[in-house]
Image: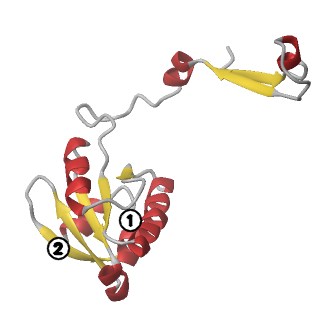
Amino acid sequence: NSILGGGRYDGLVEELGGPKIPGFGFAAGMERIVMLLPDDVPEGDEGKPHLFIATMSEQGFNRGIEICMALRRKGIRVSMATETKSLNVQMRAANRENATFVIFIGDEEIRSGAAGIKDMRSGKQRSVGLEEIESLSEGFRNVIYG
């Protein structure tokens, strides 16, 4: 019934003809990890991020990571590029991931304290305070739709 296991493997490299060095390792059973996933995902919503954070500067990227982590801690599925990329590349990624909303964060948004948020279904866009975004919970749609 183990999910993963591991331990020390001192001497293993030496047994295989290498130098005497300490080692450790582990292995996980993918099927067992999948069995631990919750079953309460709404049908048709599997893996789809609620929000995609598109950043337009290094400062925006750093702020985007902070917001992303704050929202993930609250159970909101958030996605963003792992590095600063062009807005077109990020929008294609948001479409590919079938994100519900995209939040745009750059230097101007940080200065003003408000970011644009776009509903990817309707195409409507509005401005939302960065503090409001970070304080969102599962009921975030009410804040976004205003």
In front of the other: 128 or 103: 103
Q: Quadrant of residue 1?
A: top right
Percent from the top left, x then y, of residue 73? 51, 55
Q: Mark 1 and mark 2 in contact (Cβ < 8 Å)?
A: no
Q: How far is mark 2 from mark 1, CA to CA?
A: 16 Å
The amino acid at mark 2 is Arg
Residue 20 is left or right of residue 142, and the answer is right
Q: Residue at x 88, y 29 (%)?
A: 22
Q: Residue at x 47, y 56 (%)?
A: 74
The amino acid at mark 1 is Leu
Q: Which residue is mark 1?
A: 136
Q: Which residue is mark 2?
A: 126
Q: In this rendering, is residue 127 above or below 30? A: below
Q: In this rendering, is residue 108 above or below 37? A: below
In front of the other: 101 or 14: 14
Residue 16 is left or right of residue 113, and the answer is right
